[in-house]
Amino acid sequence: MSKLLRFLVDHKLQGERKPLTAYAIAVDALDRDDGFDTQIDSYPRVQIGRLRRMLDHFYLRESGEKRLSIPFHHYEIVLGPNDPVDVTTQLLGNDRPIVEEPLVSPTGTEGVPTKKPGAETGRSGGLLSIARDHIWLFIIVAMLAAIGAFFYLRQTAPATETTISYPAIIVEGAENITRSSSRAKAQMTHSYLIGALKRFDQLRVFDEDVDGQIGAQYLLESSIYNEAVDRIQLRLVDSATREVIWSSPIEVGTIEALEADLDQAVVAIASPHGKIAQHELSKYRGDYSPGYPCLLQFHQFLRYRDKELLTPALQCMEASAKQYPNDSYLMSMLVVAKNLSEQFIGPDELDGISRDFALKAAKLDDDSASATFAVAQSAFFEGDCRRGLAWGERAVRLNPLNSRIMGYLGLYMLACRMPEGEAYSTRALQMDPNADLVVAATLAMQKLRRGDAKAAQRLSSKYMDSAPGTTPGLEISYILSTAMLGDKDEARRAWRSLAERSGLSESAPPREVLSKWMSNPLLISELEADLLKAQLY
């Protein structure tokens, strides 16, 4: 963000008249290569929006006559009054020239405000004078205020029949900090947490200054107990009961180390199986009602792949789609649900087409990481690995802390014979110990195919021990790696256990046992060959 801000300011100081483009932002400011395609990747616009929000957040807390801002639908930065009314005028985005002040002239002297014909540069005329000369402006501002109030009320109102009630969290900043260095780091921590948490589509995230009528279920509090050691304590609190759900100290050292620790905290809180999801699941355990309860159950199925949970999960996803047709996150998860339905039950279990769900999700929210990844998943399901990779990498850029997106991108890439996918799956497991088990199983099989049987066995054992139920993918990788390491007796014992849970004997053909747990014929054939090669019979 600092680099992007510096680039925008330098462009303004050079007096360039040619407007900045998304391509210039991507290549010159954000280090993308010359082949960057702005038609399929909105990364520059996303980062400009992020910087715009950071500036707005900064100037809400800092007093002063002037402020930097980036008008909507523009990439250029402007210097103007730190006044909500004047900022609203700048953000209109209409054809009237924006009245702005120069930042600093190329020679290094401060710019002098210039008065444009027909524009007021002082306050002497008052509101009546402005109203006489610019009645159209007041009409537009009034219209914008009405529209803004409408959308604000929609956002803050209780859930209706067409709105899924996702958990809401207010991020509170540390208070009563005297040291300027500690105060600056605390403010940076506050802004960073808000920005990172807002990337998760299954959360509603608010600043502490928001109206208290949003019905937030959670508070993320931060405090500094001992400023001498620069230590920030984070606590996730249930706002109704004041129960502390999660707590972690953050050592404030270098900026890089601080950001790494904050990333880890955000993953622990907001990941698909993080502290908030686990706490919510305790309220809705076994509840397959349409909407958020159903999404919780569907995520549980994805994590553990318990086939007994699949049918009720798909049924409630179907009901949710009918009740909440305009929810982007729900549409993105329906892509996965539709694919699972076709694999294990039948094509008619879920009405609709996977690609249509993905495109609708992206249309509803083209800056959503989950919606973007839905398009990637749809492409992978159709066998278009190149297109799936392009959309998947864009989704990772939109939210690099989403372990589900990271892990499944690696999984799909490995299925497409792209060995680079191993790095994505490894990263997902490193940053989120609660990642879906299918990611761990796929990664273990990849290590096994590379000849690293010891690493495959260690990874399989680790996640098998932590799983509450059956884990056929991990068990198969454990069986094969154990056999490869020479312990045939243990491998046969594990295979016998898997066969018996399938309702078969240990002498049953491998294909028959594997078919009880998998539907992909190519994968079954590959594993059958691996098991026969292991000579367990």
Image (cartoon, rainbow, N blue to C red):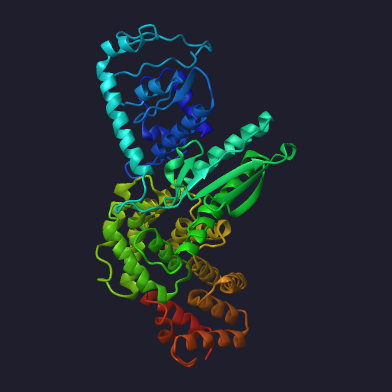
**Residue 240 on image: x %, y %:** 52, 51
Q: Residue furthest top?
A: 124
Q: Quadrant of residue 383?
A: bottom left
**Residue 399 on image: x %, y %:** 46, 48
- Kindly identify the residue that appears in the image at 30 percent across and 29 percent down: 144
- Kindly identify the residue that appears in the image at 55 percent across and 61 percent down: 429
Q: Quadrant of residue 53?
A: top left
**Residue 249 on image: x %, y %:** 66, 48
453 or 408, which is in the foreground? 408
Q: Compared with residue 441, is residue 40 higher up or lower down, i.e. above or below?
A: above
38 or 174, which is in the foreground? 174
**Residue 233 on image: x %, y %:** 65, 45
202 or 361, which is in the foreground? 202
481 or 308, which is in the foreground? 308
- Kindly identify the residue that appears in the image at 29 percent across and 9 percent down: 118
- Kindly identify the residue that appears in the image at 51 percent across and 49 percent down: 218
